[in-house]
Amino acid sequence: MCGIIGYIGSQNKGVESVLNGLEHLEYRGYDSAGIAFISDDKLNIIKEKGRIADLRKSVEITSSNLAIGHTRWATHGEVNKVNAHPHHSGSVTIVHNGIIENYIELKEELIKKGYEFKSKTDTEVACALLDYLYQKTGDIKESISEFKKKAKGAYAIGLILDNDKDNLYAIKKNSPLIIGISKDEKFIASDVPAIIDYTNKYIILEDGDYAVLNKDSVTVFDNENNKVNRKPRTFEGDALSISKCGYDHFMQKEIYEEPEVIKKTALTDIPDISNYDRICIVACGSAMHTGLVGKSLIEKYGDIPVDVEIASEFRYKKLFLDNKTLVIAISQSGETADTLEAVKIAKKMGSDTLGIINVKESSIAREVDNRVYTLAGSEIAVATTKAYAAQLEVLSKIAYSLAKNSKDASKLKEIKDYLEDLQKLPIIMQEVLDNEEEYKKVAKEIYKHKDIFFIGRGIDYALAMEGSLKLKEISYIHSEAYAAGELKHGTISLIEEQTPVIGIVSDKLIADKTISNLKEVNSRGANVIYLTTNQIKGEGDFYSTKLVVPEVNPLLQPIINVIPLQLIAYHVAKYNKCDIDKPRNLAKSVTVE
Ligand code: AGP
């Protein structure tokens, strides 16, 4: 939700490292930002509403060996300078990612002890509590240990003390926090991209850990406050994988990386999951949409019932889970709070859990019993594209692995060349990408509309949901995805002259049904964009534009069909001059409930 970073070293690079790191973390939230640093033994705190670029303009002093910074996605308190981090109280300054759930009662206790508050944030309360404990004990480590007992919720905290310019402190619970290690510089950060320009060596803190960093060493203490060695890791990507490489936006670059991602993810192994009676997929947003595609494929070819649950709903409903149900958690970031909690609930109820995760060693990756990594690399654009495609691929591999044991030979015949088709898929994906101008033309036709509909049947309905979400989240145009056969039960009343309706028709067996739904909306004035395959005829004058993609193995068709939808959304947003990689109100990883 937010991004934090901290620096301690001897190269006087604290300010630049923190500002640069924040720029790499902006995808986690970007409504306000701030930096605190010690320079000439003086604490400086500078905060701005808006982007890191606005903050940069306000920072004059550049030399510091101790600095912390924060880019915010507001959870408590409106978006303004006062609520921006860092927050300071007494002798303590902190930046924080997460939510202190019991901040109201803590605030009341601290007000009785004489503390005053300027902001509406839970973070300022956390800061005051740490200061209160530090004033009481005179020992920051003891204060942190006490803080962990009193503060409930999720926090990744960077902390500096007014009177200690040689140490940087980090505290971690239920929000991601890593420590970057370089020769005589140490970093804390919410995610690896923040430090990649300085080091690819890092440590992942576990829940309950806190750490004391100075320029030469890092000491980590576990939940019981015992010194512990956390395994140093090496980030396999590089700065290049985090740059735009000449594309106008990360989102476009990441769409074009999809063939490569599919090639890499094809090599992942799928665990044997043939001994379960049922599968329950739990996820949020686009990850949940891939779950709906997975449901369609796994049920049809794997012959096993699949439920798909929105994680935030799953957590609060009556569940029918047991040791014969496999719970599959799908998450690009591996940090989505609701999905993480859903995994914990599933494990408590005796189900095995399998993660389909993009970020290695993320919280969900470490919580599930087993995991398959999508090898999509760092996905910087808030709107997921390449990770979504890789998730579809893993789900197709799961469906194929189950189909091989299926007794229904006719189904197996349909997908018998899956492995060979998967090898060829990247080339066919590139052919679809090469038609970008066609999708750009569609975008130019529809970008001024205020309502845009996506319809489909079966697996195409699941894709319609993703096409609609992509459009909404980056272009701010209202859009709805509808089961094609359901439209006439009410929503068709919204169809007006030239209302854009994007119809996805890729299943030969039900193509005629969806085409007749498209004719219904067309006869009421809709501007139909017809997305179909080269093996489905469906001629007639019910559409203004026909987009044709190659027909491939049914298990892989969704990976092809989604590309035009992603590029149409991208170009609609571009024509509308939206902030494509960092859409308003959004964040890449929703680490709060
Ligand atoms: C996708 O474009 C959105 N940014 C969002 O729906 C995302 O898919 C959802 O928040 C789940 O995130 P996760 O995959 O990291 O768990």
Image (cartoon, rainbow, N blue to C red):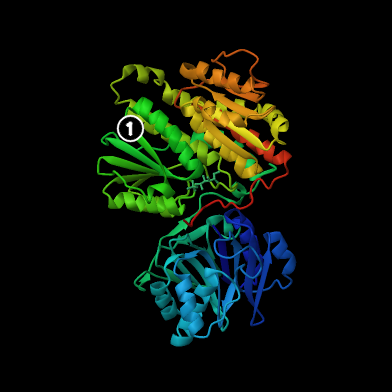
Q: In this view, does 555 lie above or below 111?
A: above
542 up-or-down from 567: above or below = above
Please give the residue where the numbered disc 1 appears in the rendered image. Answer: 305
Numbered label tally: 1
Quadrant assignment for the N terminus: bottom right
Q: Is residue 259 left or right of residue 175?
A: right
Can the viewer see residue 53 in this picture? Answer: yes
Q: Which residue is at 46% across, 22% downward? A: 553
With 391 as the anchor, is 245 left or right in this view? Answer: right
Report which quarter residue 20 is drawn in: bottom right
Q: Where is residue 126 in the image (x, y as percent from the top left)?
A: 50, 73
Q: Which amino acid does label 1 sit on?
A: Pro
User: Which residue occupies the foreground of this view, 221 or 408?
Assistant: 408
Q: Which of 345 and 431 is in front in this view?
A: 345
- For the question of whether residue 183 can be seen, the reply is no
Q: Mark 1 packing: few (<14 Cα in 10 Å), some, or many (20+)?
A: some
Q: What element carries label 1?
A: loop
- Foreground: 416 or 151? 151
User: In front here: 332 or 225?
Assistant: 332
Q: Where is residue 293 in the image (x, y as percent from the top left)?
A: 45, 32
* Ligand 1 contact, mark 1 (Cβ < 8 Å): no
**Location of residue 72 in the rendering, given as x and y in whole percent from the top left corner:** 59, 61
- From the viewer's perspective, tell me whether residue 146 is left or right of residue 27: left
Q: Where is residue 63 in the image (x, y as percent from the top left)?
A: 68, 73
